[in-house]
Amino acid sequence: MPVNIENLSKEECAFLKNIGFRIQYMRKKAGLSQAELAERSGLADSTISHLESTSIYTVSLVSLFRIASALGVEPKTLLDI
C-alpha cells in the first residue's frame, strides 16, 4: 500500500526501495516476468509492479515471505541491508 513519504525517514525510504530493487533483481535472475512472480506468490501483478517501482511502497511480512518462496530464497535475503 502506498504511504505518505513525508512520515518516513530517508533511511526508511531507502530501505523500502532496496527491497523492491532486490525483488526485481532476483526475479530477473530467475527468468520470471512480473506476472509470473505474481502468480507464483499469489499476489496481484500490480503489487509486484509497485514494489519494483521507484516509488515508496510498503509490503507486509506475509507478502515478503510469499515472494521469497516464489523466488526460492530465504525471506531474509530480501531484507539484507
Image: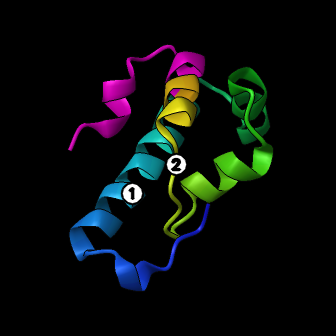
Eye-nearest disc, 2 or 1: 2
Q: Residue at x 47, y 50 (%)?
A: 20
Tell me which colouring the rendered structure shows: rainbow
**Residue 38 placement, left or right of 75:** right
Nearer to me, 68 or 61: 61
Tell me the number on the disc at residue 64. Answer: none
12 over 7 or under it: above or below: above
> Which residue was labeled with disc 2?
59
Report x, y in % for residue 75. Answer: 39, 24
The answer to which quarter of the image holds residue 2 is bottom right
Q: Residue at x 29, y 64 (%)?
A: 12
Q: What amino acid is at disc 1?
A: Leu
> Which residue was labeled with disc 1?
16
Report x, y in % for residue 74. Answer: 38, 17
Report x, y in % for residue 56. Answer: 49, 68
In the rendered structure, are the residues bearing label 2 and label 1 in contact, judged by CB atoms less than 8 Å apart?
Answer: yes
- Give the magenta range: 68-81
The answer to which quarter of the image holds residue 31 is top right
Magenta stretch prevailing secondary structure: helix
Marked residue nearer the N-terminal end (2 or 1): 1
Report x, y in % for residue 4. Answer: 49, 79
Q: Is residue 71 magenta?
A: yes
SS at circle 1: helix
